[in-house]
Image: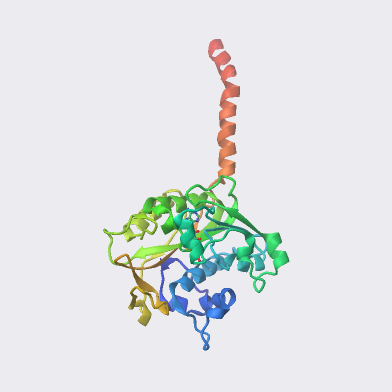
Amino acid sequence: MATPKLRSCLCQQSMLESPSFVKWIAKFAPEVLRSDGSPPINRKFWEWGFIVEALSERGCLQPGKRGLGFAVGKETMPALFAGLGCEIVATDRPSDDSADVKRWESTNQHANTLKDLLRPDLCPDELFAQRVQFRAVDMNHLPSDLCEFDFCWSACAFEHLGSLIHGMKFVEASIDCLKPGGVAVHTTEFNLSSNTLTPDTGPNVIYRRCDIDGLIERLRSKGHDIEIDYSTGEGVWDHQIDFPPYDWEHHLKLLIMGFVSTSLGLIITKDANAMGRQKARVRLLWSKVETVIRRPFRAVKRRLT
Ligand SMILES: C[S@@+](CC[C@H](N)C(=O)[O-])C[C@H]1O[C@@H](n2cnc3c(N)ncnc32)[C@H](O)[C@@H]1O
């Protein structure tokens, strides 16, 4: 029987320790595996494993597929995907003197150039240079030429765009970057303490279930596909909360700004019948041109009838 595909869900110990996640972690971060081959109980590796496994299951990680990474920081995914034959546009926030950029630079989570993403063990440098481009892109203002990708992803990023609303607008805009039937996988912070109170503006926001349900409803109303499971897991470490200063060793559920939180992964498949953004624009333009061209003929016809 075929193993069911991942759905959008919350970080769980059993998934992190599953053979498919461990197989990917052994590729993109072999140095973190313990001597018995088990992964660190840390949600960062769950997030990256979730993104890679979701894309792999959907046939995205194959030669010739085009992928777009947002806020890649020092992720190893661009190199991993390029090593598997994909063409990648890796992006991160434009560099400036802001406290926000300094924060990511000081924690080694910001990319400025292609060099920041090199991983010769995953993709030889020469192939990497052919298959990966780097662009500075603000997730709050996606350029319109970022379109027609087979897949896109972001890890731990859309909660840093200024407000809950900014993050959700980004998720919806990221779908415009895809071909019909393309796949978006994004991870973010999820509030396990409250479905009412939450940090809703500022450098870090935390999504409540009501926010995610609203986002899913909007995505579905546009014809996109997304299934979600809000189970929190039954593993020993699913019930432990890491308090600041964090221990990091057992870090699936944690206290952030007074709220118990965990990671949420979203998998969205774009409506297979949706027109690409460029095609939609060309059609709109053409219909306007047609209207203008036909206007004099209609006027003549009206006079004659
Ligand atoms: C927590 S780090 C995550 C980095 C990387 N995705 C990872 O998983 O290690 C947050 C990332 O969001 C990026 N970021 C913050 N605001 C952004 C914006 N407005 N546009 C694009 N990237 C942004 C930062 O530069 C940083 O790379």
Q: Is residue 129 left or right of residue 169?
A: right
Residue 65, image x, y percentages: 64, 60
Q: Considering depth in this image, is 281 or 256 the residue closer to the camera?
A: 256
Q: Nearer the viewer, residue 226 or 203?
A: 203
Q: Nearer the viewer, residue 65 or 110?
A: 110
Please report the residue visible at 58 percent of the width from the left and 73 percent of the height from the top. Answer: 28
Q: Residue furthest right?
A: 126
Of residues 192 and 116, the one drawn nearer to the viewer in this rendering: 116
Q: Is residue 91 visible?
A: yes
Would you say 133 lies left or right of 35 here?
Answer: right
- Position of 83 with respect to 212 (left or right) is right
Q: Residue at x 54, y 54 (%)?
A: 95
Query: Which residue, as the protein is rendered here, is positioned at the far bottom?
Result: 36
Residue at 58% across, 68% down: 76
Image x and y of residue 295, in percent: 56, 20
In this rendering, the answer to whether 261 lies above or below 278 is: below
**x, y percent for residue 243:** 33, 74
The answer to which quarter of the image holds residue 207 is: bottom left
Q: Position of residue 147 (x, y in %)?
A: 58, 49
Q: Is residue 168 above or below residue 118?
A: above
Q: How is the image coloured?
A: rainbow
Q: Does residue 84 show up? A: no
Residue 298 to residue 217: above or below: above
